[in-house]
Image (tube, rainbow, N blue to C red):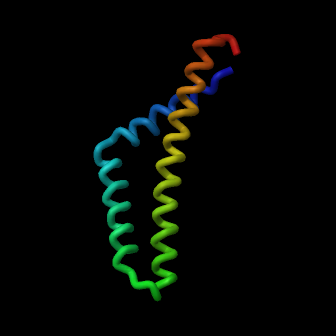
Amino acid sequence: MIDRSDEERARQAQNLLSNELFVESFNVLKEDLMSRWSASGATELEARESIWLAMRLLDRLRVHLQSIVETGKMNEALAKQHPFI
């Protein structure tokens, strides 16, 4: 049986990933973090590590949302192929 909440989550995640303000926010944050990392000195290890972790978290958030969308698409395809499962 297909969980309809997965479909709703996929729709919401897709809406976020398609939202211009959301995409802009991700891009601005990523650019800001890259700029900070580039401007940091080689001896600022803690700052550089914090920036690197923030960039990874930003990437993980986007990947998680994309994963929710893909799960929804797979569930939708499964429901079409096997409507009684």
Frontmost residue, 72 versus 42: 42
Q: Is residue 69 left or right of residue 33?
A: right
Vertical side of 81 occupied by 76: above or below: below
The quadrant in which residue 84 appears is: top right
Frontmost residue, 51 versus 79: 51
The quadrant in which residue 77 appears is: top right
Residue at horizontal 37 percent and vertical 67 percent from the top = 34
Vertical side of 46 occupied by 19: above or below: above
Count of numbered tags: 0
Q: Quadrant of the N terminus?
A: top right
Residue sitting farthest toward the bottom = 43
Vertical side of 10 occupied by 83: above or below: above
Residue at horizontal 56 percent and vertical 21 percent from the top = 76
Q: Is residue 85 left or right of residue 27?
A: right
Vertical side of 7 occupied by 20: above or below: below
Q: Is residue 6 left or right of residue 42?
A: right
Frontmost residue, 71 versus 5: 71
Q: Quadrant of the C terminus?
A: top right
Q: Residue 78: horizontal and vertical position, in percent? A: 62, 19
Frontmost residue, 72 versus 33: 33
Q: Residue 35: horizontal and vertical position, in percent? A: 33, 70
The quadrant in which residue 20 appears is: top left
Residue at horizontal 51 percent and vertical 47 percent from the top = 63
Q: Residue 45: horizontal and vertical position, in percent? A: 50, 83
Residue at horizontal 37 percent and vertical 54 percent from the top = 26
Residue sitting farthest toward the front = 42
